[in-house]
Image: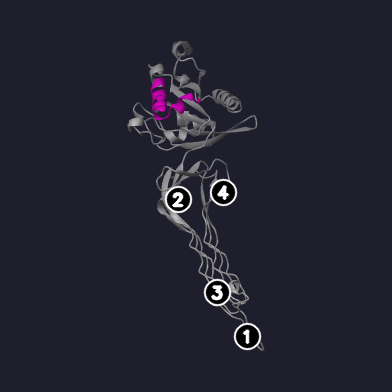
């Protein structure tokens, strides 16, 4: 499935139906009074979040959305039918913005959450509404009001308990696949992952959601590599799992490269709780791993451990650590 995290769409709520101007026409009733019914209300545009969706791709190809108009009123004081509301489903984590793409309208943070963004027009009045003691046979009626219409932006920011970050080829996609049932593309070249991938894992009857954020590189905030396109998705993650390739020589430098990119994009990201894992431990001798960890911890005093994504024992160890931290 193709990934899209931003879209601009035009929405138009339904217009209200016109009121009716009619008079009773009954046998033996010489002067039938007014009996025009009111018009029905126009349908509204309502957005609903759905945790089973993870892309806005449907809004790339269809950009205009209109709710039904209300029906006109009828004789015998019949009110026109209301127009049907249009329900537009979006992924959990979607934000609605005004046309300037800066003014926030609504932020979907809960599943099945609904927000009415454009109201349908009210139906017009039939002539029965204008009957009075001085005007027994009014011909006046009113048209329905127009429904609201405007352009809006949809922006998706992935919501996950854990955001997996790190340089390209650190093994983030392999880790996500080992922890969950997600099936991200995996290969031994940079930028295999070009879109965020989501997965859910379970441990001790507890559930956590993980997001594999595409590989960051030095200068990402300037547009290098995949640029800062996906840094926004880290904002919603409760905890960051920083994955490093332990076979690399400059572990401290590699760690700092990512931290600099996060801080440059948004200082708040550097303050998020972080867990560090060193991957590919199956490729080195135990003594070499211990020496590397010792040197790293001299300069970076954060919780860290080494793993191999091919070890089920290590995968269970990671799950236990993640569950413990998410539920603190």
Task: Using the image as rendered, state which of residue 111 and residue 20 is in the foreground.
Answer: 20
Residue 195, percent from left and from top: 42, 38
Identify the mark at residue 114; answer none if there is no mark. Answer: 4
Q: Earlier in the sequence, mark 4 or mark 3?
A: 3
Point out the stretch of residues depicted in magenta. 255-272
Q: What residue is rendered at 53% in x and 60% in y?
A: 43
- Measure how far apart labels 4 and 3 are at the Cα level: 34 Å
Identity of the residue furthest to the front in this view: 134
Distance between mark 1 and mark 4 Cα atoms: 50 Å
Label 3 sits on a secondary structure element that is loop
Cβ–Cβ under 8 Å for marks 1 and 4: no
Q: Position of residue 29 (x, y in %)?
A: 66, 86
> Which label is found at residue 58?
2
- At x 57%, y 79%, the residue is 22
Q: Residues within 10 Å of mark 1 (few under 14, many from 20)?
A: few
The residue indicated by pointer 1 is: 31
Residue extending farthest to the right is 28
- What distance separates the C-alpha of mark 1 from that of mark 3? 18 Å
Callout 4: 10 Å neighbours few (<14), some, many (20+)? some
Q: Are marks 4 and 3 in contact (CB under 8 Å)?
A: no
x%, y% of residue 103? 44, 43
């Amino acid at each position: 499935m193709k990934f899209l995290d931003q879209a601009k769409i035009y929405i138009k709520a339904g217009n209200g139906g016109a009121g009716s101007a009619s008079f009773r026409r009954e046998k033996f009733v010489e002067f039938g009074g007014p009996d025009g019914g009111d018009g029905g209300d126009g349908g509204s545009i309502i957005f609903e979040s759905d945790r089973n969706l993870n892309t806005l791709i449907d809004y790339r190809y269809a950009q205009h959305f209109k709710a039904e108009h209300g029906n006109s009123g009828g004789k015998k004081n019949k009110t026109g039918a209301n127009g049907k509301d249009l329900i537009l489903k979006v992924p959990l984590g979607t934000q609605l913005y005004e046309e300037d793409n800066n003014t926030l309208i609504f932020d979907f943070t809960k599943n099945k959450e609904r927000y009415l963004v454009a109201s349908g027009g009210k139906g017009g009045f039939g002539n029965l509404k204008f009957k009075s003691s001085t005007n027994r046979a009014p011909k006046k009626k009113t048209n329905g009001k127009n429904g609201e219409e405007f352009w809006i932006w949809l922006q998706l920011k992935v919501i996950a308990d854990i955001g997996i970050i790190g340089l390209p080829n650190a093994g983030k996609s392999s880790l996500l696949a080992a922890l969950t049932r997600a099936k991200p593309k995996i290969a031994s070249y940079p930028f295999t992952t070009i879109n965020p991938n989501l997965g859910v894992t379970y441990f001790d009857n507890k559930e956590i959601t993980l997001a594999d954020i595409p590989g960051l590189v030095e200068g990402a905030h300037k547009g290098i590599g995949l640029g800062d396109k996906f840094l926004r998705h880290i904002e919603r993650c409760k905890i960051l799992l920083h994955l490093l390739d332990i076979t690399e020589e400059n572990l401290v430098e590699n760690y700092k490269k990512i931290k600099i990119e996060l801080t440059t994009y948004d200082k708040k990201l550097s303050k998020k709780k972080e867990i560090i894992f060193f991957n590919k431990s199956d490729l080195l001798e135990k003594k070499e791993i211990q020496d590397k960890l010792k040197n790293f911890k001299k300069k970076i005093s954060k919780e860290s451990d080494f793993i191999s994504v091919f070890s089920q024992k290590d995968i269970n160890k990671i799950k236990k650590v993640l569950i413990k931290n998410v539920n603190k």
